[in-house]
Amino acid sequence: MSESVNPEQVPEDAPVGEPAQTPAAENSAAEGDALAQAEEILNGVEVPAEESVAQGSEADEVIELKNDLLRLQAEYVNYRKRVERDRAVAGQMAVIGVLNSVLPVMDDIDAARAHGDLADGPFAAIATKLETVLSTYGLEKIAAVGVPFDPTVHEALIQQPGADIEVDTVSQVLRNGYKSGERILRAAQVIVAVPEA
């Protein structure tokens, strides 16, 4: 049984005997790689031989068109790189937004662990899984106890003189700090031991 073709679906300028392209096929062809299309055009342009260069205007026009295509190709490559870079930055910002929203949950887990409520059992396993998943997205605790005080990653709430202390050193963490890669999500709130006067 042959399929009937609705005359309204066939474009007026469609060649007789050839199947008309559907809108989906036209869209997929339009979505092809524009860079590959530009290269194909550039490869198809023939620069005239030296004897025909004397004809002048036609050769100049061909060279000008080729230069225009080369500029267009360079602009497209730059545009594509910029779009990919912007897309990567947007993805990173989305991940950082989610990690920031999870920090209060991490504080509750730390508090429960400090009080011995997460020694074992199903909630301890859930907390461990959550920490593992978040670490795959780049969340890590800022090293604090026993390290030299660094104002870029530590927030000093209390200073106490300490024996045998040569440089300001973190002696206790009041609230954990977190970072994702090089970005500080939240500074660690700490008590700092300072050299005795």
Image (cartoon, rainbow, N blue to C red):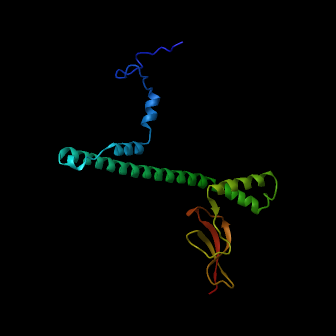
In the rendered image, the quadrant that contains the N terminus is: top right
Quadrant where the C terminus is found in the figure: bottom right
Front residue (pair 19, 24): 19
Q: Is residue 193 above or below residue 117?
A: below
Label total for image: 0
Instruction: Kindly give the residue lying farthest to the top in the view shown.
Output: 1
Residue extending farthest front: 51
Image point (71%, 60%), residue name? 110
Q: Is residue 146 above or below residue 176?
A: below
Residue ID at (77%, 53%): 125
* Residue drawn at 65 percent across, 69 percent down: 143
User: How far across and how far down the image is residue 116, in percent?
Assistant: 79, 61
Q: Which image quadrant is residue 57 in?
A: top left
Please state if 113 lies on the left or on the right of 191 as rendered: right
Q: Position of residue 173 (x, y in %)?
A: 67, 69
Direction bottom: furthest residue: 197
Depth check, front residue: 79 or 117 = 79
Q: Nearer the viewer, residue 189 or 100?
A: 100
Task: Say above or below: 164 vs 36.
Answer: below
Task: Work out whether residue 102 or residue 86 is closer to the camera in this orientation and state it.
Answer: 86
Name the spot of residue 98 as percent of width and height, x first. Answer: 59, 51
On screen, residue 97 above or below 195: above
Looking at the image, which residue is at 63% across and 73% down? 158
